[in-house]
Image (tube, grey):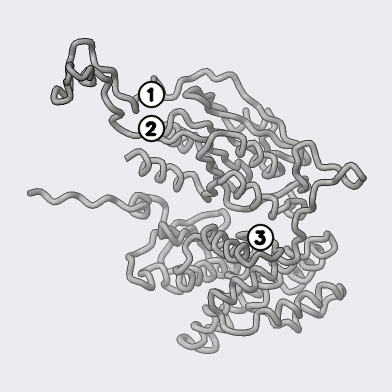
Amino acid sequence: MARKPKTRTYAQKLAKAPSAAHHLLTPSAYSTSPKGRGPWTVLSTNRVPRVNLRKRVAELPTGNTVGARASRWHEAQHVRWGYRHPNPNTWVKAINRKLARLKTPYTAVTTIDLNAAEDHRVNVLGLQATYAVLGYQAWLARRQDLRDTFLASKVVETIGGFITAGRKDLAAGVAVPALSFYSSAELSDGPNPDANELVELASQKLEGALNDATVEKVARWIASFREPPEAPATSAGGAQPSPTGLKGGWGKMAVYTPAFNEKVIGAEGPKHYATETPTGDAHYTHRWRPWEGSFSVFRALKRKRKAPPFGAVLCDLSGSMHVTEKQIEEILDASPFTTLAVYGGYGARGTLAILARNGQMRRMSRKELYAVGVGSGNIVDGPALEWLNKQPGPRVWVCDGGVTGCNDSSEHADHHEIQTLLAKGRVKQVPSLDEFVDELRRMRR
């Protein structure tokens, strides 16, 4: 009997992709897993470096610049110390469920809060391991790379700017990871007394063991600076809600529905239903009991397989995200009747463009999308998610988690409102289209 071939992993499928030079990856955390789950696929990138702990793929910068070395080292620490929580979105939901069971007022934790606390933990653990294994000089070199990449003066300036803008939560999110390679005295010597006080508070919160409980505690502390959403204004006075019902500083969004000029392959009809039994062609003859008035043998055949996944997919088309035409075709090939839309904007306006619906589609180049207002900034994350919640489920939001408001500024984005919209519509957030396409294919089996 022939052996069944093994299914290739996602990392094996990327084997032909451009690989980063192995001698530039320090430490060698990507060679094997801490639990021995096999090698990683390491790719070179000119974008923001990142690692996918679940699919074991790392996108890292090449070269010998200070920033490239610091990025490679930092992402390697995520691989070495963060394998227990491969999905930050799942971890955030677990933390918020714990907070909800307390039945006390709380501000929901976001992935931004959690990532800031986790960045501090992996940096500290990585520096401690470097000192213990490689010695003082190696520890000094690694810490200096981080300091040269994030200068103390720039960190202090950023913290002060966020506090002045009224976003103390984002200021705390900058201070926490910076305290992994700076002392509190080095960051609390600026001209802004509020920023100095915040750094001292962050230093006190970071004291203690570096474990999951500490990360959750620090993430909750960062989120506590973000005010919960206010109740809607009454007729007695006060600020009136925006036309969309959202409170955040989002841009104004327009919905663009082009004239569909192409039929999606595989959308010829509801193939998930079997054809009816031809007249006079009997099936299940053991059920034929005419003396009881039962003629079920002429009944239509039962459904042969479950329906393919319909629903709606919303893709962030900002500069930090990259959606190709091939990826869109793969989504519609896996689920021809899915509603597929992309969004983006610039300044204080944005556009959501519907590219496919009910088995019909319209191919639009990036230039055509720009012409109708789909810019390279997020701008309208909140209104776009509100639109998604009105579509039939299941609902999927393809976004890396970086949201912005007017003028593409994260200061105007209400992250708590984003989490509320995701929970209200039971929206599943995925960081890339590749992961979503793989999941669609599994659902069709």
**Residue 103 position in % (x across, y down):** 66, 64
The label on residue 83 is none
Apparent side of residue 247 relative to residue 236 in the rendered image (left or right): left
**Residue 143 position in % (x across, y down):** 60, 79
The residue tagged 1 is: 270
Task: Kindly identify the amino acid type of the residue bearing the numbered disc 2.
Answer: Ala
Can residue 260 be seen at all in this image of the molecule?
A: yes
Q: CA distance from mark 2 to mark 1?
A: 8 Å
Residue at x 63%, y 46% (from the top left corner): 319
The label on residue 307 is 2
**Residue 291 position in % (x across, y down):** 17, 17
Apparent side of residue 355 relative to residue 10 in the rendered image (left or right): right
Q: CA distance from mark 1 to mark 3?
A: 41 Å
The residue tagged 3 is: 108
Q: Are marks 2 and 1 in contact (CB under 8 Å)?
A: yes
Single out the residue that lies furthest toward the top.
279
Badge 1 element: loop
Task: Kindly identify the amino acid type of the residue bearing the numbered disc 1.
Answer: Pro
Apparent side of residue 226 relative to residue 141 in the rendered image (left or right): right
Crowd class of label 1 (few under 14; some 14 to 19; many from 20; radius 10 Å): few
